[in-house]
Image (cartoon, helix red, strand yellow):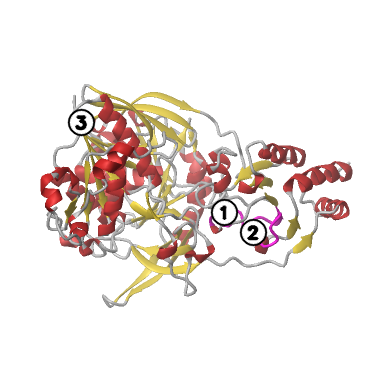
Amino acid sequence: MSLKIVVLAKQVPDTRNVGKDAMKEDGTINRAALPAIFNPEDLNALEQALRLKEEHPGSTVTLLTMGPPRAAEIIREGMFRGADGGIVLTDRAFAGADTLATSYALSCAVRKIGDYDIIVGGRQAIDGDTAQVGPQIAEKLGIPQVTYAEEIISVADGKATIKRRLERGVETVTCPLPLVVTVNGSADECRPRNARRIQQYKYAKSPSEKAELESTALYDARPYLNIEEWSVNDVDADLNQVGLAGSPTKVKGIENVVFQAKESKRLEGTDAEIDELIQDLIANHTIG
Amino acid sequence: MNNLIVYCEIEDGIIADVSLELLTKGRTLANKLNCKLAALVIGSNLDGIEKQLYPYGADIVYTADDARLYPYTSLPHTAIVCGLFREVEPQVCLMGATSIGRDLGPRVSSTLHSGLTADCTSLEIGPHEDKKAGKTYENLLYQIRPAFGGNIVATIVNPECRPQMATVREGVMKKEIYDANHQGEVVKLDVAKYVQDTDFVVEIIDRQMEKSKANIKGASIVVAGGYGMGSKEGFDMLYDLAGVLGGEVGASRAAVDAGYCEHERQIGQTGVTVRPKLYIACGISGQIQHIAGMQESSIIISINNDPNAPINTIADYVITGNVEDIIPKLIKYYKKNSK
């Protein structure tokens, strides 16, 4: 049985190694100092999708991302690793969306894709760490969800068998198709880019990117190089449910994190100092 | 009506710590809001479960008791939570930021179209003014959470939609008995009214749960290592020191990502929050996301060969030197002085 697989992915600023220059003096984020990357757990999800594609000949893997036009970069990245193609859901009307408005927009795009068996995405994105969009898309599509997945063990007889990694153990579940699966970072890493696929797809571009080219003749001859771009109208989304207007949560305020500095005792680590330190800690009952 | 409801997780008949922590916080918030504190427990064999919840201040305990409701699966629990919420219209709902709460919360928020804020580190009650709409609101839940790798803290509100939903990680709030003699009422829910047979589509075919090995949340002494420990073997020294002092070993995210230590020992915004009497940070530079998870420790010792490591600013004692030299000395002089 061939499968239609949709991979949800997000282009995120790399918040894992935030350097000193990541914040501007006025307390706002210096996005230019943070590289934009393929959200790590979405790569774990892509790997699960690519394995299903290999096990089920004739299957397709379509990437779906919402973001600014430059998010086409991660679609290309996914194609280098084995995805068949992808869609960038991009529109100014989507700006300022919280997770609920985001999941609504993405669910509209999935409905437009129409035919799908498995929707798989990372558990959460590193710029928000909310883990909400996957389950919310499942709810909006009226299909079940399996979160915290570590491995999609098999898909057979209209059912997926999935191993979940929870805080204190593992669980193996079965769930009928179609469903949404969110994948943990503990799952196997995504395969690297494939040299042949890089050659094949390096000119893959979205309409926004093609607008800067002098000639687009290549894209008529090789339709597989087209990355799709959908607007709010393309997916028939209700304007009241997208972007800031469609978001129940509002940001009331943002503060820079400043920790109260203490007056520290500075030690060089000599024997006499450590001896005294230990005696002090015992004397004030910090250690017994 | 319009009460504050805590969704309570249960494992082997015991209410999860994170749920008791949320009841403790919920009690304070309910007093400010002048509403009742309710607990919702969904599972099986729940007779007497209220005895675990009343001491933490629960006024109402809703139970949905059915053999098929334990262990947790998404759709039946969502159906019960949403069904109950449509009837009793709580103003606030709190859940643990666990693999259950983070599976259930978003599904419920999507069904009810209410806002949900994940992984809050602080919850407060206060007013809000929407200048554009010319509206003011009283007694909203301030859902305060770090964002952007912990470099900023955002306060989120849900002005219009109810309930205002938030999840909180285990160990972030304190668990405290409100009144050992506090009494409330039990309301048994009719499961069949909320749940359809078709909600049981996900079948659990195998489940292996273990008790948590590490108890860093409750430890009074924590010896934590960072990327500066250099290797998994480097952590052995920390286990030696923790063993001698009677403490637990913790780790920074960088050390866990590098594979030096298992994730359940991670301290910080994406791990556990700890408040020990003594925190010894070894080779930890002190990214904000780590500091947020340990800054309330009573005494902090930082051992680092970088005299300007950010963590030093919040340390009571800064020892500048190599961990390989300092830690054996700490062990040596502890043994000498403790006799």
In whole angstroms, how far apart are the C-alphas of marks 3 and 2?
51 Å
Residue B143 location in percent, x, y?
A: 42, 60
Identify the amino acid type marked 1: His
In front here: B29 or B11? Answer: B11
Disc 1 element: helix
Query: Same chain, marks 1 and 2?
Result: yes
Residue A110 is tagged as none
**B77 within the magenta span:** no
- Find out whether the residues at labels 1 and 2 contact each other: C-beta distance under 8 Å: yes
Look at the image and tell me whether residue B84 can be seen.
no
Q: Is residue B98 found left or right of B307 in the rendered image?
A: left
Identify the amino acid type marked 3: Ser
The magenta span reads: B289-311
Q: Is residue A131 found left or right of B49 in the rendered image?
A: left
- Which quarter of the rendering shows the C terminus of chain A? top right
**Pointer 2 residue:** B311
**B307 within the magenta span:** yes
- Find out whether the residues at labels 3 and 1 contact each other: C-beta distance under 8 Å: no
In whole angstroms, how far apart are the C-alphas of marks 3 and 1?
43 Å
**Pointer 1 residue:** B290
Q: Nearer the viewer, mark 3 or mark 2?
A: 3
Residue A127 location in percent, x, y?
A: 40, 55
